[in-house]
């Protein structure tokens, strides 16, 4: 049932829409009105406090920050597609009081696409900025209308993205122009103008509705996930001698040292220059770091949070009117790290100054360039973290402290990259990549009792292009059809749907996503040459390692076959035997054709077939994906297992490893799409997987009966902790300092080392198959829809506490079936 709204869409006098033209009769966005902010207020009287819950519903195109009587209530909305929009609901009763009350909203329209938002199709009067809200008070409803008052947000300078890759918009605020306490109940807004009501309108036809549902979003949806939560973390000011050795010892070029000095920002025009340019000039000057309170014309202050953090900055200052503070939160305090950051510039009011940029940021080191005639007092530097909630279960604990720490940091990495979607990294892009998310989701399903985002993210990503394939990013700048997609990322998305089938057992949800999965799989059919995918267009990535994909690609073919196998299993579970038969038929073709990649002399699958000739390169990606897809016949299994186990011959190389700690900047590596032919010894060396694709490698080892190897393989992540101990990096060398796709050990230590998996969809029965490897003991807990399952295991026995029946799989393959409850048995 469509919700009946009383609030009307409102905005300032002008939206960001230009008038219709012959080419665009429904209007288009006016670039001169991009990055616009508007202050809204609505005062009202209450004779007494509300007797019942006071529910306030709100959403905006693009963003809102909500206050009631000066108290910050929340912000939103969550990421959304171009044709739908969600609303948030708050109980604001505790913020209301008898007498004069006010609802105040800072609304923002980006205009420019950013990593977490892209413009909706303009609909003549909608799609260029808008706010709708309503407060339900006992028996009355107070909604947005012309009684609301607005003030243009001229205190902010409109900015635009620096580049396609770096599309976050810098924030430039002159607090002297922002009315103080504008969101309080007793602020005088009599000089503000009346809000403009926006009505749905077509070039031909009558003026339509001003209340939802309207074009281009239709009926507004309730928020699909809980409110984001997190701790407040504080930073301490440091000087360059206190920086970690990894920052200053060879991994960072000398021109990027932490500095402060006099006059380094002279002549900078604060109203027009990219804020990062001023910081870059300071970083290049080579002086020593400043301390707080030093009287200087310009100084650079560096603060360390002690770990990667992600959320909203909150900096309290003691400053003089007109003092200028430029800053950015960085992975490292270097000029190269600055190249991928979102910066801000703040001109002080001179009293009650707080720098609180509206967009989330991530990093570890805050750099502040202060320009003042006197000393500036930085009273506090904080980040209010905002992540999806994690309701914890008992962690993985073993007799190897290294694995325990890897598990802990992996969970923290997923926390940092789980916002209103699973994102790649909080420190740079914050994009919701279609393929990356399968790892984040897998970790949440074994370590978080709140599966809200694990269930929602595959739904969010299910926004296919007109041809059926998914974009490589959803609900953001790269989701446009003008950007080619990564075909294999859509196949990893199918695996995330399969995870919902196995773990949640939600028939309605899986059935809802199956048509999208089918369209993805059918997209690949024209490129199938007797079961081998050849010359697939787009950016065939596979992994950041140099997997060869020209011509017929074994790795891509195997991923497609895994998708077909997963789809068939889900279709048959849903009772859709026809689609199950279709998928199995295609899978059978791949089984027959895939053996063309086998080189009997090399005793391995080659990665490519080009013009009928077998290629030379060999990768664990192809081997592992083939195992997971059920393509490896019994005659090859021993050789494939031997290849996956021989870690001495594995090598990894990526465009990001060219510059290690990104001293050359994040975009300086060789593009994966133009990899050259192998220049390594393909008869002895094997292309090894980066952290992301290791989830497939570990799955393959388990299928081959080698799950005992996985605990030791997870020790490879020790190398990541040496260089970045608080979050997991993107690649074995190089890339961002916090990347959720690297967190697979958190899944695998529970799934394979402790061996806890669903024996039936939705955990109607739990399977426990511990494979400790080099460990002598381990324990942990995973969530299920019926309650947590706890496992404690040593070399000879396993203790299980489960709310559902148990299947214990012993080392010899025999199965002991036990009732729900607590049981101890031998393994």
Image (cartoon, grey):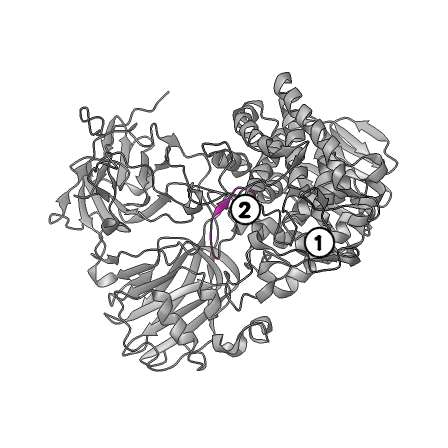
User: Could you say which quadrant of the image residue 9 lies in?
Assistant: top left
* Residue 385 in the image, given as x and y percentages of width and height: 46, 53
Numbered tag placed on residue 758 in the rendering: none
* Residue 180 in the image, given as x and y percentages of width and height: 22, 57
Q: Is residue 796 visible?
A: yes
Of the numbered discs 1 and 2, the one sitting upstream in the chain is 2
Residue at image coords 23%, 32%: 8
Q: Is residue 449 visible?
A: no
Residue positioned most to the left: 191
| Mark 2, secondary structure of its residue | loop
* Residue 760 in the image, given as x and y percentages of width and height: 70, 27
Q: Which residue is mark 1?
A: 687
Residue at image coords 82%, 50%: 776
Residue at image coords 59%, 65%: 658
- Magenta region: 427-436
Q: Is residue 615 magenta?
A: no
Q: Along the line of sight, which residue is nearer the eye, 801 or 502?
A: 502
Q: Is residue 428 magenta?
A: yes
User: Could you say which quadrant of the image residue 97 lies in?
Assistant: top left
For the N terminus, give its image quadrant. Answer: top left
Q: Which residue is mark 2?
A: 539
Residue at image coords 35%, 79%: 264
* Residue 555 in the image, given as x and y percentages of width and height: 67, 43
Label 1, residues with CA under 10 Å away: few <14, some 14-19, many ≥20: many
Q: Is residue 526 left or right of residue 60?
A: right
Label 2, residues with CA under 10 Å away: few <14, some 14-19, many ≥20: some
| Mark 1, secondary structure of its residue | strand
Q: Is residue 273 left or right of residue 589?
A: left
Give the tally of numbered discs: 2
Q: CA distance from mark 1 to mark 2?
A: 19 Å
Q: What secondary structure do most residues of the magenta stretch adopt? A: loop
Q: Along the line of sight, which residue is nearer the eye, 186 or 444?
A: 444
């Amino acid at each position: 049932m469509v919700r009946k709204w009383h609030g009307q869409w409102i905005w300032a006098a002008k939206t960001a829409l230009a008038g219709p033209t012959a080419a665009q009769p429904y209007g288009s966005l006016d670039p001169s009105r991009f990055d616009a902010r508007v202050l809204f207020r609505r005062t009202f009287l209450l004779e007494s406090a509300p007797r019942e819950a006071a529910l306030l519903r709100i959403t905006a195109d693009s963003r809102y920050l909500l206050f009631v009587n000066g108290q910050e209530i929340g912000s939103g909305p969550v990421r959304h597609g171009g044709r739908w929009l969600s609303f948030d609901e708050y109980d604001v009763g505790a913020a209301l009081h008898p007498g004069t009350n006010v609802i105040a909203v800072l609304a923002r329209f980006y205009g420019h696409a950013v990593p977490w938002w892209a413009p909706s199709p303009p609909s003549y009067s909608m799609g260029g900025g808008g706010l709708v809200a309503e407060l339900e008070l006992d028996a009355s409803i107070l909604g947005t209308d012309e009684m609301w008052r607005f003030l243009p947000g001229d205190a902010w300078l409109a900015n635009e993205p620096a580049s396609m890759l770096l599309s976050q918009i810098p924030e430039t605020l002159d607090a002297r122009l922002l009315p103080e306490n504008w969101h309080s109940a007793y602020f005088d807004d009599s000089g503000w103008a009346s809000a403009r009501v926006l009505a749905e309108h077509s070039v031909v036809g009558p003026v339509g509705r001003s209340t939802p549902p309207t074009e281009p979003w239709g009926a507004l949806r309730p928020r699909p996930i809980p409110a984001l939560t997190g701790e407040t973390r504080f930073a301490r000011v440091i000087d360059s001698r206190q920086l970690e050795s990894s920052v200053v010892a060879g991994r960072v070029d000398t021109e990027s040292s932490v500095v402060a000095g006099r006059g380094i920002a002279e002549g900078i025009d604060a109203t027009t220059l990219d804020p990062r340019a001023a910081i870059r000039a300071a970083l290049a000057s080579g002086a020593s770091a400043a301390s707080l309170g030093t009287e200087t014309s310009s100084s650079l202050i560096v603060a360390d949070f002690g770990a990667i953090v992600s959320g909203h900055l909150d900096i309290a200052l003691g400053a003089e009117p007109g003092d200028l503070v430029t800053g950015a939160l960085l992975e490292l305090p270097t000029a190269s790290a600055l190249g991928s950051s979102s910066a801000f510039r703040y001109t002080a009011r001179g009293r009650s100054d707080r720098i609180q940029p509206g967009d989330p940021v991530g990093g570890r080191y805050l750099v502040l360039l202060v320009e003042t005639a006197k000393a500036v007092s930085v009273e506090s530097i904080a980040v209010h973290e905002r992540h999806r909630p994690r309701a914890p279960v008992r962690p993985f604990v073993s007799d190897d402290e290294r694995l325990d720490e890897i598990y802990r940091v992996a969970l923290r990495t997923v926390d940092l990259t789980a916002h209103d979607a699973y994102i790649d990294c909080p420190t740079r892009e914050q994009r919701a990549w279609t393929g990356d998310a399968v790892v984040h989701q897998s970790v949440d399903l074994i370590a978080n009792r709140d599966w809200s985002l694990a269930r929602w993210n595959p739904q969010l990503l299910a926004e296919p292009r007109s041809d059926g394939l998914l974009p490589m990013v959803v609900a953001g700048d790269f989701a446009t059809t003008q950007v080619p997609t990564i075909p294999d990322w859509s196949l990893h998305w199918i695996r995330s749907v399969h995870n919902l089938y196995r773990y949640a057992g939600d028939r309605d949800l899986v059935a809802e996503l199956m048509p999208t999965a089918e369209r993805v799989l059918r997209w690949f059919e024209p490129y199938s040459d007797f079961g081998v995918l050849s010359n697939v267009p787009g950016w065939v990535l596979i992994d950041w390692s140099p997997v060869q994909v020209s011509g017929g690609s074994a790795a891509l073919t195997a991923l497609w076959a895994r998708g077909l196998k997963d789809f068939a299993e889900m279709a048959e579970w849903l009772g859709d035997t026809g689609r199950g038969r279709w998928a199995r038929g295609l899978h059978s073709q791949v089984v027959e054709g895939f053996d063309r990649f086998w080189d009997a002399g090399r005793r391995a699958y080659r990665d490519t077939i080009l013009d009928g000739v077998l290629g030379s390169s060999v990768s664990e990606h192809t081997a592992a994906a083939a195992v997971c897809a059920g393509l490896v016949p019994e005659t090859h299994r021993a050789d494939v297992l031997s290849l996956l186990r021989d870690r001495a011959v594995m090598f990894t190389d990526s465009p990001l490893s060219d510059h290690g700690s990104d001293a050359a900047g994040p975009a300086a590596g060789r593009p994966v799409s133009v990899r050259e032919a192998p220049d390594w010894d393909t008869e002895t060396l094997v292309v090894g997987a980066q952290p992301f694709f290791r989830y497939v490698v570990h799955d393959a080892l388990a299928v081959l009966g080698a799950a005992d190897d996985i605990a030791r393989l997870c020790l490879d992540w020790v190398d990541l902790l040496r260089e970045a101990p608080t979050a997991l990096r993107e690649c074995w060398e190089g890339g961002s300092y916090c990347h959720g796709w690297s967190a697979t050990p958190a899944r695998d230590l529970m799934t394979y080392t402790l061996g806890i998996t669903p024996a039936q969809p939705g955990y109607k029965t739990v399977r426990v198959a511990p494979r400790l490897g080099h460990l002598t003991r381990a324990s942990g807990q995973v969530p299920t829809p019926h309650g947590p399952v706890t496992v404690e295991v040593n070399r000879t026995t396993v203790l299980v506490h489960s709310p559902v029946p148990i299947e214990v799989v012993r080392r010899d393959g025999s199965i002991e079936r036990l009732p729900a409850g607590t049981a101890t048995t031998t393994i």
